Amino acid sequence: MANAGMGRHRPGAAMRAFFLVAILSGVFIGTAVAGVRALTRDDGTPAGAGGGGSPAAAAPGSSETPRAAAERFAKAWSAGEYDTLYGMIDGPSQAAVPLASFTGEYTAFATELTLRTLSATVASADGASARLTVHAATAYFGEFEYSTTLNLSRTGSRWFVAWTPAVIHPDLAGGRHFKSSIQRATRGSILDRNGAPLAITREIRFLGLNRSAVQDRAVLTATLGELGFTKDQVDAAFNAPGGATQRVTVGAVPDSLVETAALKVRSLPGAILFFESQRVHPLGGSAAHVVGYTREFTAEELEQRRGQGFRPGDRTGATGLEASLEKTLAGQHGAELRLVESDNTTVVKVVASKEYAAGQDVATTLDSATLVAAQARLGSRAGAAVVLDPRTNAVLAMNSSPTFDPDAFERSDRAALQALANAPHSPQANRAATGLYSAGSTFKLITGAAGLLSGLYKPSDTIFCGASWNTITPARRNWEGTQGPQTIAQALMRSCNPVFYEIAYSIYMVDGKEAFLSDVARMFGFGSESGAVGISDEAGLVPDPAWKKKTKGEIWYPGDSVNLGIGQGDLLITPLQLANAYSSFLAGSLRVPVVVKGEEAKVRNPIPLTAEQSAHLKLGLRLVTSESGTASAAFANAGYTDFGGKSGTAEDAGAQQHVLFVAFSPANTPRAVAAVVLDEGGSGSIEAGPIARDIVLTAIK
């Protein structure tokens, strides 16, 4: 079969790859928009507003009409050429309003409205007056359209405007003016179950450069090296786009070096210390996949959000909880535009308002200690770990390996992102939620449950565990020699393939039950997304006769059920599904995993095992970790006796195998279930078992 670990396509992987490539290639508007930032104020006002423009147009001659004069005025206003506008107003107006005051009125109007663009056109011209239709697009207040009047007087061959502030907007008569207030929402934090931050926005001290002021690049590079900055970081800052006087970032200054950096910068021309808000993920790679990271809005996304207060450089959730809980975390920028009297306090009216909503903190069920322990135990091995509390179905940890530094995206670290793009084994892939694997022998719990639920077997029944199983051809070998008659619990203890072959085959041979084992698998949550709020996961695949007929045009053979009985064939599951299946078994019903505090572990369906049947299967899982079980080396023989679990080893493409283990403890009243999958390995109990064991021990401390 195809590689069931990481060889399968997963929706979302392409989008993550696009974001990474886009950041590196400049599609995102971080560094590419530096020029735009230089031309635009924070509130969206064009930096040139109120500055000089082209000189006044040459006198058009005696043929000029009032409409033509109004059109020249409208064109210059639309272009922000305030000096040109000043040349179009009449003598008395210029005498009453100096150029600086004139341009100040237009600049203040643009600033208070958070003006992005303005378009003025002539609606009508009648005798000595004209009416303009003005369309204003703002950063915070959406779009306005209004009319204003130009009163014209003729001097020689030209028409001039008798100007007052009411020409800008009719409400500005009598000394009134617009006044705005802006509230920008700060992104909320993501917290673990104990209130420790998993993602937080902090004011970070950075070291930057004014390249135009650098006197000795070699000395600067050496000095910054003493502060921990590499030559590549310094060179990247020097090579960053933008003008020589534009501030560029070298990197963050560690708290331990703040005083040293401040002293060195004083005598280092061109070096700058500054503060900037940045999203920080304190656990780094230990929570990278489940918590995620943010990215800058693209130009297209900013265009779609015009009038909502977003600016170039603003960020949004890209992956993980940062993306799925974006609306809650981001909040909403608030703004109010008022018309006030000349005293600057008396409000005539509120012209426009946008409600402010602070970014909300999100409390999760995740446990920092368990996340860190799980990542450490996975180490450099490709794989995943998921930990649930079976009492509440709360997600305590969700880890994928290899991992990455999410803050490399926050600080737009091009060197780190390039290395990530070239790294083997897809570090950004969330194997825990979207990795697709065969279940191997961990599926034998479901096959045992199906045998009991079918009514064909009782807990007291025994099935012969031989060295091979010959009921259908070809014969199938057991992984060890003959064990004799075994109950289902004993077969779980020794992971006897022939017992579960026989159960799957027996169910298949009952009329109308060809799909029964597949249906029981779905009862345990396989073959569908988990439904967890905040988690984007894969549905996987549970094959059955209808699926095979539709996709392959073939009938469902006894061998298909037999292969499914030991978790092989076309079955594909995620580590999250595996952990949830065992948690659901321990609780007696399939539930939705919970990662956001306050969400309910909704029951999707009961698992209708009797108390006797459930106790029998739990006994089998406890026996797995006993001195007689397949996982004795990692558990009972190592002194860990209060566990239950099940191992699995599944074949992938070629000779590659992946290995699995599910462990829970305490055995009688479990508080943590951990499912561990390693992309390559030889033994689930020997390799994945100790990892799952140690993660559970951390979770239940």
Image (cartoon, rainbow, N blue to C red):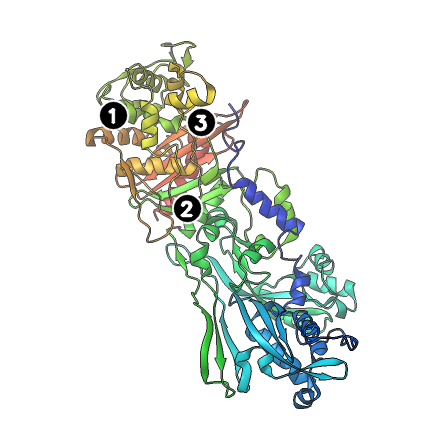
Based on the displayed image, in which of its 4 quarters is residue 81 positioned? bottom right
Residue 676 pos. (x, y %): 43, 37
Distance between mark 2 and mark 3 Cα atoms: 23 Å
Task: Look at 47% across and 71% down and name the residue there.
Answer: 352
Task: Label 1, secondary structure: give it.
Answer: helix
Task: Count neighbours of disc 2 (C-alpha within 10 A) and say few if under 14, some if 14 to 19, many if 20 or more.
Answer: many
- Dots 1 and 2: beta carbons under 8 Å? no
Residue 157 pos. (x, y %): 77, 81
Which residue type does callout 1 highlight?
Leu
In the image, residue 347 above or below residue 481:
below
Residue receiving disc 3: 649
Q: Earlier in the sequence, mark 1 or mark 2?
A: 2
> Left or right: 637 with respect to 270?
left
Labelled disc at residue 397: 2
- Dots 2 and 3: beta carbons under 8 Å? no
> Left or right: 60 with respect to 311?
right
> Left or right: 267 with respect to 509?
right
Task: Label 3, secondary structure: give it.
Answer: strand
Residue 306 pos. (x, y %): 54, 61
Q: Earlier in the sequence, mark 2 or mark 3?
A: 2
Task: Count neighbours of disc 3 (C-alpha within 10 A) and say few if under 14, some if 14 to 19, many if 20 or more.
Answer: many
Viewer-side residue, 29 vs 3: 29
Q: Earlier in the sequence, mark 1 or mark 3?
A: 1
Q: Is residue 32 visible?
A: yes
Task: Look at 54% across and 81% down and name the residue there.
Answer: 172
Residue 631 pos. (x, y %): 38, 30
Viewer-side residue, 471 vs 339: 339
Which residue type does callout 2 highlight?
Ala
Task: Look at 59% across and 70% down and name the residue there.
Answer: 134
